[in-house]
Amino acid sequence: MKLRVGAALFGLGVLLLVFAAGLPFYVAPAVSKLPYDLEPTTSIAEAKDAKFLKITASGSSVSIEVPQGDLRSSVEVIPQPDDTKNRLPKELKGDAVIWDVFQTVKRVDTEEVVSQYSTEFALYRISGAAAPWKDQWLNESGANETPVGNVSYSGQLYKFPFGAGKRDYQVFDRDLKRALPAKFTGTEKIKGIETYRFEQRIENEVLATPEASIQTLVGKFAPGATSGQIVYSNTRTLWVDPVTGAYINVREQQRKELRPNTGTPTVLLDADFNYTDETVSRSADTAKDNRFKIGLISLWGPIVAGVLGLLALIAGVWLVTRRNDGGAAARHRAEPAPVAPAVDSTPTRVDQEPVRDTDTVEQPKPQPVGGPLTDEIPPASTNWKSDDPTVPTQRPAPGEVEQR
């Protein structure tokens, strides 16, 4: 029984050690990817006392103004697993996923919609960077039609890579329609997570704007001007969980100005958007859960499995060797040890002194004793003769004369 248990523990130990070695190399890479069935997420950012452009069309008249108030931006990310399976080209299958993103900016006090956009794109599952997909699109007009292929995404999109490093990354900006560097500026602990802080500075970039829109704005805010341009600035700060690449906090200090060729510039947007506390907490909690899963697979799982496997291996070897030793001992006990001849403890009686070479006196030889109760015939003697004439004398020995 012990032999079977020991063999089972030995096999379990080997299996656990193999499992521990395989976790970080085969299982962990599969966990450190964007899943196909990722749950939709919604991030809320608010800008207090912001200035913003408001255009209201009523019949044939158009009202343009720059009011001031609190704004709320809602960004909803909806993964598309079916589209990922069916619409991605062969070279992206398994490596990328398709996401739909919808943003709506509303005025807090009146719930009026200030701006909207929707977009669809593909991004790589590990790096979080945009994948080259010809069917990507961006709709900023709010119309139902989605012009396919009107944007070319690049750089990071809504997340950073798994295992982000302390270096600069290219981050896509929707207003400029291109990626610009976001510089690593340090670390900061948020809700128990040590995040990497990245900062992207965009200063006085001219936005590509239809001429009809420029003329409408110039006619409203700079009647004496004949042309103008919209200049865009933004300081985007991203606090990223380096393990999962998820955004824990986001701040965007946006500013847009109409700069006519004649006249005073007009601020069209001046807003400081920050994630709400609820969004930061939810993002941190999600990152902690994902961190735990990744750590369990890539670090703690191999350690625990390795220790348990080693213990099982040692226990199995010990049981097997202990079983063998016990059997040998039992066999040794079953075989009787050879018994030495019994030694008589009675002292040996010596009837005659031993003969030594140094003795010169010849010891008399013992004579056999005859008697009436013995069957032994006494030997003839040469030293006697009978006086009776009728008794024959002893035959003389050879060379000896018979005597009478």
Image: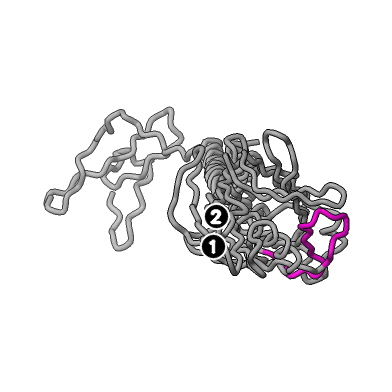
Do tag 2 and tag 1 residues touch (Cβ < 8 Å)?
yes
Farthest residue to the front: give it. 224
Where residue 360 sits: x, y (%)? 11, 52
Identify the residue under disc 1: 202
Helix, strand or loop for disc 2: strand
- Residue 337 shows in the view: yes
Q: Nearer the viewer, mark 2 or mark 1?
A: 1
**Closer to the camera in the image, 85 or 269:** 269
Identify the residue under disc 2: 236
Q: Is residue 311 left or right of residue 218?
A: left
Where residue 174 sits: x, y (%)? 67, 60
Question: How is the rendered protein coloured?
Answer: one colour
Label 2 neighbour load within 10 Å: few <14, some 14-19, many 20+: many
The tag on residue 360 is: none
The magenta segment is 130-148
Where residue 87 sits: x, y (%)? 86, 63
Magenta stretch holds residue 314 = no
